[in-house]
Image (tube, rainbow, N blue to C red):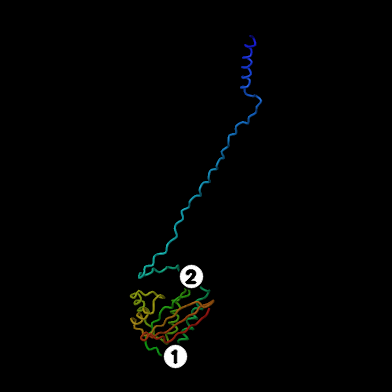
């Protein structure tokens, strides 16, 4: 009878032992996957406002095109000279005219225009004009200077910048039959003085010449 009571206990113990976990069994620990960290994108470059390129004006057929204004060229310094050297130029030009055959054809008053300064720097061309007139006064009769000055003011004439039409009109109103004009220019390291004599009635150039010097 005792064995019958012990057997169930042993069977229960065996079954219980079978269900207990094995303390010596080693199971690998669960691995948690690591999510890669995506780096933040770099900030965008700063934007710079670039003005659009200028578009050329539309060309409309039949409409006038505005002229392009160019800056004036800077004045070039004149070569070194003296008043005596310029006076010799005026004397030499006067002597050329006095020795020409064309001076014998002049029958009437002469309008002497101020010598134009085409050197590119300030020059005393008024003194050259007076020197030329003084040298030719023995052979030519010049219109009174005061009368010419008054007519120039009436015609809004600016010395050295009048066109030929204005000079012809000025000569006729002053009673002159001829126009003597000249210009001072550069010539290498020196200057050249040119002159011409025109018949105002026919528009014919009777004489022209040029002298150079330093």
Above or below for 40 versus 135: above
Please state the horizontal and vertical placement of residue 44, each as a whole percent of the image: 50, 48
**Position of residue 37 in the picture relative to residue 155 (left or right):** right
Residue at 63%, 14% in the rendered image: 7
Quadrant of res 71: bottom left
In contact (CB < 8 Å): disc 1 and disc 2: no
Q: Which residue is mark 1?
A: 101
- Between 65 and 80, the one lying in front of the other is 65
Furthest residue in direction top, as rendered: 1
Q: Quadrant of the N terminus?
A: top right
Residue at 43%, 85% in the rendered image: 136
Report helix, strand or loop for mark 1: loop
Above or below for 20 versus 139: above
Quadrant of res 155: bottom left
**For mark 2, does the 10 Å Cα neighbourhood hold few (<14), some (14 to 19), or many (20 or more) residues?**
few
Residue at 37%, 68% in the rendered image: 60
The label on residue 75 is 2
Quadrant of res 160: bottom left
Please state the horizontal and vertical placement of residue 133, each as a whole percent of the image: 43, 82
- Between 18 and 45, the one lying in front of the other is 18
- How many marks overall? 2
**For mark 1, does the 10 Å Cα neighbourhood hold few (<14), some (14 to 19), or many (20 or more) residues?**
few
Report helix, strand or loop for mark 2: loop
Please state the horizontal and vertical placement of residue 2, each as a whole percent of the image: 64, 9
The label on residue 136 is none
Distance of label 1 from label 2 (alpha carbons): 39 Å
Q: For the residues carrying marks 1 and 2, which lies nearer the camera in this image?
A: 2
**First-in-chain label (1 vs 2):** 2
Above or below for 163 versus 31: below
- Between 122 and 168, the one lying in front of the other is 168
Please state the horizontal and vertical placement of residue 150, each as a whole percent of the image: 34, 76
Residue at 39%, 77% in the rendered image: 163
């Amino acid at each position: 009878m005792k064995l019958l009571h012990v057997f169930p206990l042993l069977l229960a113990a065996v079954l219980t032992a079978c269900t207990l976990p094995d303390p010596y069994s080693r199971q690998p620990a669960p691995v948690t996957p690591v999510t890669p960290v995506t780096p933040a994108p770099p900030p965008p470059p700063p934007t710079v406002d670039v003005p659009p390129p200028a578009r050329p004006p539309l060309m409309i057929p039949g409409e006038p095109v505005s002229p392009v204004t160019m800056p004036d060229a800077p004045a070039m310094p004149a070569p070194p000279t003296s008043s005596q050297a310029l006076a010799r130029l005026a004397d030499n030009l006067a002597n050329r005219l006095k020795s020409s055959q064309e001076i014998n054809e002049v029958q009437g008053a002469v309008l002497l225009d101020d010598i134009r300064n085409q050197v590119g720097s300030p020059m005393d061309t008024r003194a050259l004009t007076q020197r030329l007139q003084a040298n030719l006064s023995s052979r030519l009769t010049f219109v009174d200077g005061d009368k010419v000055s008054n007519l120039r003011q009436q015609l809004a004439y600016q010395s050295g910048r009048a066109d030929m039409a204005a000079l012809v009109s000025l000569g006729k109103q002053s009673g002159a039959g001829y126009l003597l004009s000249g210009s001072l220019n550069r010539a290498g390291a020196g200057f050249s003085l040119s002159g011409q004599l025109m018949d105002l009635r026919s528009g014919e150039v009777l004489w022209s010449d040029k002298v150079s010097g330093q």
